[in-house]
Every structure is written in structure tokens, then in C-alpha cells.
Image (cartoon, grey):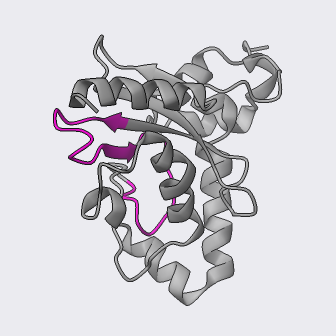
Amino acid sequence: MSSPSKRREMDLMKLMMSDYKVEMINDGMQEFYVEFNGPKDSPYEGGVWKIRVELPDAYPYKSPSVGFVTKIYHPNVDEMSGSVCLDVINQTWSPMFDLVNVFETFLPQLLLYPNASDPLNGEAAALQMRDRAAYEQRVKEYTEKYAKPEKAGGDGDGKSSDEEVSEDEYASDEDGDDEEDDVVAVTGKPDP
């Protein structure tokens, strides 16, 4: 590669061509959101998470900063900030890796094989070690509540948002934990 900026441009184009929905932040190519689907055959299946990616000036020689914007229940993801604890991104990154590796390999492996011995979410780690079935149930609850395709900006199942928002979701959206939830609540069903 001739320069980090050319590599950044090529990797971003490769990610966009891999069927990931990418939304740029500002006008540059250094910050963007990516819609990430939960891996099949996992308690995250069916969920869609909005991931914020920031590429440092020295990318690909320095790893991208990756964090969950959409709330997720996982031992290696900080519930409040969305920060990810993943060695391959944080310590063992190599310029041989690219953005597609992050979304097709590293993040799916993180969700499929959580490491409770190196937690950012101590509660999730303790629950995973103590009661795997209860942990997976909590993951599914978070996925249902926060990571449904319509909440991440995905197409869902083709219904309009009027049809997708139930009365129960109105009540849960008032907690102010996610701006996208607030938008769904505002554009949901009109009062009878």
C-alpha cells in the first residue's frame, strides 16, 4: 500500500461492498457507524447492533477503535460506554487485518466465545460463569429490547414503524437510554 489514507479508503470501500450498512460521521473517512448482525446459532441471532468505528491516522498500522452504540449484554463489552475488550483489536492488531475482518471474524467470535475471565461487564461475566442458561436468557432479552432491526435502522420485516411499536415499547422507551428508541417512540402509533 502506498499510504495509510489509500488503505483506509480501500478498506472502507471493501466493507461497504460486503453488504454492511455504513453511515459516515462528518465528511471524512475516519469515523462511521456500521450495522452488525448477531451471529447465527447464538443468543445474539436476530439482533442488529450499531457499531461506531474510528480509524486512527496511522490505520492500518494502528487498530481501529470499535464500540457498540446499541446496548448489548456481554462480559467483554462495557454496558455504559460500549467499549470492547478484544485482544486482536486492542493489543495484537496487525496491518494484515482489515475492517471486513473486524465485522466478519473478530466481532462474531467475541459474541460466540465470551471471555468471562477478562470482563468489562462484571455482572455479565459472573452470570455467565454461574448460570449459563440465565446468562443466555438475559442476552436474548437485551437483544429483543435494544437490537431489533427496526431500532438499529434496518429494514426489519418490511412493516412501517407504526406497526412495529407496541404500547409496551412506548413505556420502555421513556427511560431515555437510547436516542434511536426516542425517535421510534415519537414516530410510533398515534394516541387513540
x then y, percent, for residue 83: 33, 52
Q: Determine which quarter of the picture holds residue 92.
A: bottom left
Residue lying farthest to the front in this orientation = 2
Q: Nearer the viewer, residue 174 or 51?
A: 51
As displayed, is residue 67 above or below residue 52? below
Residue 113's spot in the image, x, y percent?
55, 72
Q: Residue at x 62, y 65 (%)?
A: 138
Q: Is residue 156 magenta?
A: no
Quadrant of the image containing the N terminus:
top left
Decide if residue 87 is on the left or right side of residue 186: left
Q: Quadrant of residue 116?
A: bottom left
Residue depicted at 52% across the width and 80% down the height: 127
* Magenta-drawn stretch, dominant element (helix, strand or loop): loop
Please state which of residues 21 and 46 is positioned toward the viewer in this rendering. 21
Residue 133 vertical position relative to residue 177 in the rendered view, above or below: below
Seen at 38% across and 67% down, the residue is 121
| Above or below, 2 relative to 171 | above
Which of the image's four quarters has the C terminus? top right
Q: Nearer the viewer, residue 117 or 140?
A: 117
Residue 177 visible: no
Q: Is residue 78 visible?
A: yes
Residue situated furthest left in the rendering: 57
Q: Is residue 76 highlighted in magenta?
A: yes
Residue 34 rendering spot, x and y as whole percentages? 49, 32
Which segment is the magenta one?
A: 53-79
